[in-house]
Structures are given as structure tokens and as C-alpha cells.
Amino acid sequence: MDGVTLRRDGHVAEIVLDRPEALNALSTSMARRLAAVCREVADDASVRAVVLSAAGEKAFCVGADLKERNSMSDEEILAQRPVFRAAFGGVLNLPQPVIAAVHGYALGGGCEFALSADMIVADESAVFGLPEVGVGLVPGGGGTQLALRKLGPGKAADLVFTGRRLGIEEALEYGLADRKVPAGTAREEALGIAQVIARNSPTAVRAAKRALRLGAGVSLEAGLDLEDNAWRTVAFSADRREGIAAFNDKRKPEWPS
């Protein structure tokens, strides 16, 4: 439906970029659908981890649909902007941990979707890039800021200013990709990681994600205060009581949250 499919397996949700005939290029209707799906997943307390994957064999996502944009007026492009921001923000702001399963081309907005996740699992075919300056644009889905935070200023500048592409080995060296897997197995690996995460306390995992996200770029002292707030969120929770009881009883916890 409109280029995005939502699947569920227990406590794991999979958001699939599902427009393979266009290499999963992001159209206006696809962006609207993605934002709506992210809102649905964010509001679902039963979802404990999310995988962002893509249909087809050639690409994770090649960015904005430039064929659509080529026929748009300046006013239409300006009106499209908040729709796109809602789509990228929807992925970035999911309260659950998000694992991007990347194969093939992850260019422009595709690279930005991957950077919006908490972890990037990429297979041997993955190619990353932020080529927007080559078509007279600036990365607009969070690329400059997310690359800066994940890669550091020098490597982010290299990626953004040149618009060049990184294969899987260089992406690993840069710290852009977090795990390399054999071709065709990124989705399977990402779903496996999500299932491991989903077995942990959902209250603790969400609090830990908030601390990690909010701690980026702040001083160590401020970061430790964020961590303390996260600890206090869960220390007196039903999840903490169940987790410790299950450990002592030598059984799997049954999380109440």
C-alpha cells in the first residue's frame, strides 16, 4: 500500500520500503504512508523492536523520487517538504530500537533512513552515499546531522561534500555500517537482533534508547544525568521487580509492561 508494508511477528514490527520497481525511491504518497505507519508502530506498546527493511534485490532505497520531483513546481516542492520531514522524523523518533537491514543501494534518503536507525546491518552488496550536492540539493532527511553524529565532522564532510559512494568495507571502516553479513542475509540478521531485543524489558530498553539519543553531543556530566534519569525511570518499575524475581527463580521473565 503506497510503497510501505507493515508486518508483525510477536513483539517485533517490520516496516518494509516496498516499491521495488522504482528501487524504493521515496514518493510523496510513500512518505505519507511511512509517517502513518511509524505513528502506528510508535503508539503500539506491544512492539518492542523494529526492523526497517526493503523489498527487491537491487536497492534499500535510492532516495527521493526525482522523476516525480522533476514535474513539480517550486510551490509543490515546498509543500512536499513537511511530508518528507514527517517520514524521516517518523523513523528517527520511534521509541523502540530500530535496526536497518540494508542491501544494495542506500543513497540520499535511503542512506538517511539507515542513519535514522539505531543500528545498521548491511550485507556485502550495500552501497551508501549522500549524493544530493550533485543535483543541486543538500541532504534534507537528517543526513548532515546524523552523519556528523555517527561519523564525526571529517568523515561526514567527506561523504556530504563529495557525494561519493561507500561500499560495505569502507562503510564499516567509517563506522557507518555496524554489522556486515553475507549477501541476501541482512533482513534475517536484523530480525534476529530485534527478537533478542524484544526478550528484554521494554521499559528498560526504551529508557536506554532515550538516554543514548539525548546523550549525543552533550557533556559527560550532562550525559550521566540523562543516564541517572533513565535508571530512575526503571529502578522502581514492575519490570525491574519481575526481572530480578525471574533471575532468582531461574526462569524467563514475563514483562508486565
Image (cartoon, helix red, strand yellow):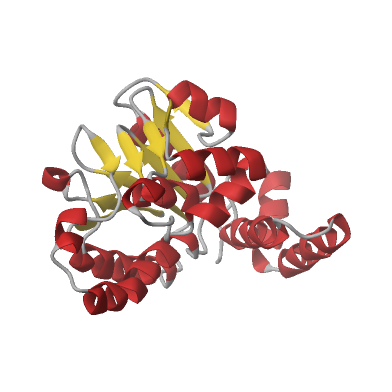
Residue 115 image position (x, y, % from top left): 48, 48
Q: Does 104 sit left or right of 204 as displayed? A: left
Q: Does 241 sit left or right of 158 as displayed? A: right
Residue 46 showing in the rendered view: no
Residue drawn at (41%, 45%), measured in percent from left and top?
111
**Number of marks in picture:** 0
Residue drawn at (31%, 76%), measured in percent from left and top?
78
Q: Does 174 sit left or right of 192 as displayed? A: right
Residue drawn at (88%, 60%), measured in percent from left and top?
221
Examine the image and state in which quarter residue 247 appears: top right
Examine the image and state in which quarter residue 237 appears: bottom right
Q: Does 252 sit left or right of 21 as displayed? A: right
Q: Is residue 194 above or below residue 243?
A: above
Residue 194 image position (x, y, % from top left): 46, 44
Viewer-closest of 67 and 255:
67
Residue 56 image position (x, y, % from top left): 18, 38
Q: Quadrant of the N terminus?
A: bottom left
Q: Quadrant of the C terminus?
A: bottom right
Q: Is residue 24 above or below residue 105?
A: below
Viewer-closest of 161 and 212:
161
Viewer-closest of 156 and 182:
156
Residue lying at the far right in this picture: please name it: 221
Residue 135 showing in the rendered view: yes
Residue drawn at (36%, 46%), measured in percent from left and top?
134
